[in-house]
Image: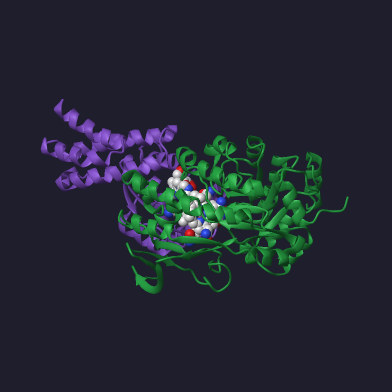
Chain colours: A green, B purple
């Protein structure tokens, strides 16, 4: 049988079938371009792009941006003016933002919100107006372009924003000082009404995704069981995933959700969701659910592991040890793909070390084959 | 007995996360002549302790802990102006911060809430705090303990820099250093010379209590 391409490997594993080797890849947004990355790609590392299938257009809302000094720091203030009032947020951008890729700094960090869009109860109505006047339009060019560039070297996923509750928790109300929880306790009607409006406005976005050229639709949540406790997950997240899946399934799209936090407390609930790919799952200590245990708990799901930055910080020997431990934990290695990182830039040395462990990870993995891999890089 | 009624109302408001009743409960307690110090130590603090226990047992989640702390603050606002200087007991001090370059504050805030529940005075410097500012705060406040939080592998090195700064300022031996956050491993804490890496907030706060309890590691 001919060797699978990197794209085939990732997609085969993601559809729950056995690939020839354990797929591993680097997300473009965290990827250095240079000799080490080229070397690793020649040794089997795939690439992944996340690109949206839609653009948005606001109606009856005007948007302005100013650079202002607030609390002694220079921030960028975006103001949305609507017929029912205006709202604004401030963000602090680290050096490099806007100068290389996405909205990330040289160190790969997105801007920090220093003032949130929703600050007080009156802001909910304004934001609801914005939500209800947001139009989603299909634009498949970014996905088609990246697919053309990559060919068989990797995959392109569609990328969606946080689901409604997390849009409030992480983006619009924010969690500094636990603010979202306080708002939810004090103004439950405002929070839940806005959530419903967001959910409704997003339906066209799911329909656009269903018809997009991407094989995988990634929902950009940041699921963490401490922030998103089981009660919230069941009430606000599971129904949204059901809606997404019901729209995507007829078009044979895979639904992935970014679960980069500690999710052991949500394990049983996650098993009941229609999600196909649990993306960015981190092994302990960054996460709290060993990958083998996760695979066993979710027999109809695939895991895309995020290799932990906490390990990279300890150097190449620690990285080698953790990569081998990961293989031993997941024998025989099905329903799995490994992302070099889902959050950080990876040093050249660490990238090459993970590649050394994974380049010969033929499936099915056995304890003996992993011992051989270990000896080959001793 | 009447006193019990007022203290119970304070406790209940906190345990039931009740924004609507806490201010009235606090006002009524003061109007009934209850000593403000007693209102805190026997009303508010036991309420938060119960919330902490429910959090530990898994009955309450982070959301409840955060909301309870907010309810507590509303109660304290009513009671605090009535405290006489003599009532302000000398508590053990903790300076706490999220380190430079890092704005993750949820973990740090939980630790702060739980430390207050245990009777510590906490000076919370906030997020994105440089090693220099942390060192200055240690110099100024002379805490028993310094807590640092980092959630990014990019920023956790700032904990090491802070410890170096403390050494240079001759302060390292005067303060216990506890660190926490997901990417911070015990190995890393060892490398940078911290005294302890907390597994989670509860366990970290237990360590702090142990450090200041005479005979259990406390001076
Ligand atoms: C919520 C979250 C956010 C929120 C933060 C909201 C806030 N106000 O704090 C937002 C969305 C803003 C955010 C942003 C980012 N994040 Co973030 N985030 C998380 C997430 C999902 C949960 C963290 C959290 O709050 N948990 C709940 C709290 C209660 O837990 P905790 O902080 O761990 O604290 C507990 C213990 O660690 C301990 N503790 C913590 N500190 C201390 C201190 C002391 C003294 C003690 C005793 C104990 C203690 O007690 C707490 C309770 O038990 C984690 C995932 C994870 N695995 O941790 C990623 C994570 C921390 N984020 C990560 C990243 C990379 C980022 C970004 C850089 C990504 C980006 N977009 O650029 C940005 C930061 C830049 C930016 N400009 O926004 C990575 C860090 C990876 C790494 N190795 O560096 C993580 C680990 C995700 C991952 N899996 O890789 N994030």
Tell which of A320 and B104 is nearer to you: B104
Would you say B196 lies left or right of B175 here?
A: right
Classify B148 as above or below B214. Answer: below
Classify A183 as above or below B33. Answer: below
Tell which of A23 and A144 is nearer to you: A144
Residue B39 seen from this side: yes
Location of residue A59 in the rendering, given as x and y in whole percent from the top left corner: 43, 65
Tell which of B91 and A339 is nearer to you: A339
Give me the residue at 68% from left, 67% from top.
A145
Classify B110 as above or below B1. Answer: below
Would you say B98 lies left or right of A50 here?
A: left
Residue found at the far top of this picture: B1
Would you say A14 lies left or right of A171 here?
A: right
Give me the residue at 30% from left, 41% from top.
B119
Classify A6 as above or below A241. Answer: below
Location of residue A138 in the rendering, given as x and y in whole percent from the top left corner: 58, 62
Residue B152 seen from this side: no
Tell which of B219 and B33 is nearer to you: B33
Q: Quadrant of residue A350?
A: bottom right
Location of residue A122 in the rendering, given as x and y in whole percent from the top left corner: 30, 56
Location of residue A93 in the rendering, given as x and y in whole percent from the top left corner: 46, 68
Q: Disc count in the image?
A: 0
Would you say A202 lies left or right of B170 here?
A: right
Residue found at the far right of this picture: A1
């Amino acid at each position: 049988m001919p060797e699978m391409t990197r794209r085939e490997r990732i997609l085969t594993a993601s559809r729950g079938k056995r690939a020839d080797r354990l797929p591993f890849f680097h997300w473009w947004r965290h990827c250095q371009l240079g000799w080490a990355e080229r070397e690793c790609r020649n040794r089997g590392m795939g690439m992944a792009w996340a690109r949206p299938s839609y653009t948005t257009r606001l109606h009856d809302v005007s948007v302005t941006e100013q650079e202002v000094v607030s609390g002694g720091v220079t921030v960028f203030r975006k103001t949305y003016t609507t017929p029912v009032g205006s709202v604004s947020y401030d963000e602090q951008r680290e050096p490099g933002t806007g100068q290389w890729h996405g909205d990330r700094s040289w160190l790969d960090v997105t801007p920090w919100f220093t003032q949130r869009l929703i600050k007080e109860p009156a802001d909910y109505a304004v934001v609801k107006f914005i939500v209800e006047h947001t139009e989603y339009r299909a634009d498949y060019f970014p996905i088609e372009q990246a697919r053309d560039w990559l060919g068989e070297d990797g995959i392109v996923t569609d990328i969606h924003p946080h689901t409604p509750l997390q849009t409030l928790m992480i983006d619009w109300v924010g969690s500094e000082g636990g603010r979202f929880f306080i708002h939810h306790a004090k103004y439950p009607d405002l929070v839940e009404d806005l959530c419903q409006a967001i959910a409704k406005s997003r339906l066209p976005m799911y329909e656009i995704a269903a018809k997009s050229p991407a094989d995988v639709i990634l929902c950009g949540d940041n699921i963490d069981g401490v922030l998103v406790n089981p009660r919230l997950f069941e009430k606000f997240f599971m129904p949204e995933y059901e809606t997404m899946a019901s729209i995507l399934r007829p078009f044979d799209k895979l639904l992935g959700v970014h679960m980069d936090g500690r999710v052991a407390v949500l394990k049983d609930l996650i098993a009941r969701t229609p999600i196909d790919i649990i993306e960015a799952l981190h092994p302990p200590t960054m996460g709290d659910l060993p990958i083998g245990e996760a695979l066993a708990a979710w027999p109809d799901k695939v895991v895309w592991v995020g290799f932990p930055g906490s390990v990279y910080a300890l150097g190449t020997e620690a990285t080698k040890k953790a990569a081998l431990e990961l293989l031993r934990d997941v024998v025989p290695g099905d329903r799995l793909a490994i992302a070099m990182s889902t959050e950080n830039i990876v040093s050249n040395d660490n990238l090459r070390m993970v590649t050394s462990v994974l380049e010969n990870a033929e499936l099915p993995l056995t304890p003996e084959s992993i011992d051989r891999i270990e000896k080959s890089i001793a | 007995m009447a006193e019990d009624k007022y203290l119970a109302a304070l406790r209940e408001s906190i345990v039931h996360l009740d924004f609507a009743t806490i201010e009235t409960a606090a006002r009524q307690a003061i109007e009934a002549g209850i000593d403000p110090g007693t209102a805190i130590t026997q009303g508010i603090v036991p309420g938060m302790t119960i919330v902490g226990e429910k959090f530990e047992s898994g009955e309450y989640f982070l959301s409840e802990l955060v909301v309870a702390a907010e309810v507590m603050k509303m109660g304290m606002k009513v009671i605090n102006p009535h405290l006489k200087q003599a009532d302000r007991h000398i508590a053990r001090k903790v300076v706490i911060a999220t380190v430079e370059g890092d704005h993750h504050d949820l973990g740090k805030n939980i630790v702060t809430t739980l430390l207050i529940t245990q009777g510590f005075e906490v000076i919370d410097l906030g997020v994105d705090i440089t090693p220099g500012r942390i060192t200055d705060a240690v110099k100024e406040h002379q805490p028993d303990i310094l807590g640092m939080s980092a959630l990014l592998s990019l920023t956790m090195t700032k904990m090491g820099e802070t410890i170096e700064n403390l050494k240079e300022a001759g302060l390292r031996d005067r303060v216990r250093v506890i660190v926490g956050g997901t990417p911070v491993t015990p190995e890393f804490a060892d490398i940078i010379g911290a005294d302890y890496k907390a597994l989670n907030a509860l366990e970290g706060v237990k360590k702090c209590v142990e450090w200041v309890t005479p005979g259990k590691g406390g001076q």
